Image (cartoon, helix red, strand yellow):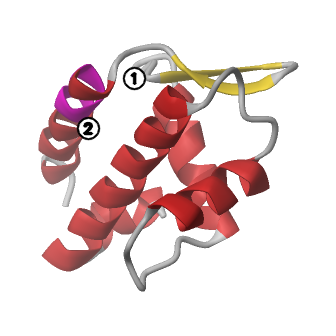
Amino acid sequence: MCSVATSGTIEDRIDTGEILLAIIRVLERAEGPVETVEDVRWIVVGMEDSDDIPTTEEVRSALQLLAHASVGVIEQDGEGYRVTTDYENGVQLVRSLGQVVNLFP
């Protein structure tokens, strides 16, 4: 999923951004950590009104990107995944990722 963001079409990049934001929204609304990648994926599937259902690998890649030390939007510990910022700040961080990704076509 995140590799698509660096080499895909504009639509691929938009889809990637939507997945990243959906994951932030899911984790922000969760009451505590979400245990597994698959749990995060199924919550995203349940919340989204889209026909484009992210794969487990897309969700895993997005979680890895969002948890990366340079991004820090989410954290993973023994209990699962949790968001470390609010949604609005997450949107700003995802936007800044888009600017960085565009530097490396």
Which element is circle 2 on? helix
Identity of the residue furthest to the bottom in this view? 51
Image point 20% across, 77% down: which residue? Answer: 11
Question: Disc 1 residue type?
Answer: Val
Foreground pick, 97 / 75? 75
Position of residue 29 measured from the top left corner of the image (x, y, whole percent):
50, 32
Q: Is residue 78 left or right of residue 6?
A: right
Distance between the alpha carbons at the discs numbered 2 and 1? 9 Å
Q: For residue 45, which quarter of the picture?
A: bottom right
**Can residue 9 be seen at all in this image of the molecule?**
no
The magenta segment is 89-93
Image point 15% across, 73% down: which residue? Answer: 10
Q: Which residue is mark 2?
A: 94
Answer whether residue 80 is magenta in the image.
no
Q: Which residue is mark 1?
A: 71
Mainly helix, strand or loop, the magenta region? helix
Q: For residue 13, which quarter of the picture?
A: bottom left
Image point 51% across, 77% down: which residue? Answer: 53
**As drawn, 105 above or below 91:** below
Specify the label residue 34 is tagged with: none
**As drawn, 7 above or below 62:** below
Q: Is residue 100 left or right of residue 23?
A: left
Q: Earlier in the sequence, mark 2 or mark 1?
A: 1
Which element is circle 1 on? loop
Position of residue 64 measured from the top left corner of the image (x, y, whole percent):
59, 39
Question: Disc 2 residue type?
Answer: Val
